[in-house]
Amino acid sequence: MKVENTQVQMRKGILEFCILHIISRGEVYASDMLEELTSAKIMVVEGTLYPLLTRLRKAGLLEYKWVESSSGPPRKYYTLTEEGKKFLEKLDSTWEELMSSTNQIIKNKSKE
């Protein structure tokens, strides 16, 4: 078993959560999301990001608006809907519980 495969799966598991957090800060363009995710070492490519954004939009968690660009075609800027904000609040609670539980297990000393 390769550790890299497990690492990739762990990162994929939190990708949606991270994307929602990035969008929660205000209007954001997809390439800015990619840049932030990459700088945080959560590697993602456009071919993964755009379908995920479409799925989140269809689920009613985010919306976008087109903004004209002086340096090319119009850009989509994403924001969370009210439903998306509530959804993210629930994910935040789950994240806190998971971190606490995981840390408890990781820090538990051997009984030897």
Image (cartoon, helix red, strand yellow):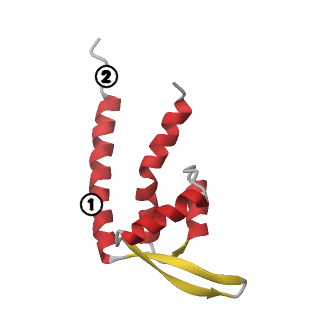
Observer-nearest of 85 and 68: 68
The disc at residue 30 is none
Residue type highlighted by circle 2: Lys
Q: Looking at the rendering, in which quadrant would you find the C terminus?
A: top left
Between the C-alphas of marks 1 and 2, the distance is: 31 Å
Across and down, in percent, residue 100 comes to 29, 43
Q: Residue at x 44, y 76 (%)?
A: 79
For label 2, the SS is loop
Across and down, in percent, residue 56 comes to 40, 66
Q: Residue at x 47, y 61 (%)?
A: 52
Across and down, in percent, residue 108 comes to 30, 27
Can you say whether 73 is above or below 37 in the image? below
Mark 1 surroundings within 10 Å by alpha-carbon count, few (fewer than 14), some (14 through 19), many (20 or more): few
Please give the residue where the numbered disc 1 appears in the rendered image: 90
The disc at residue 109 is 2
Numbered label tally:
2
Q: Earlier in the sequence, mark 1 or mark 2?
A: 1
Observer-nearest of 55 and 75: 55
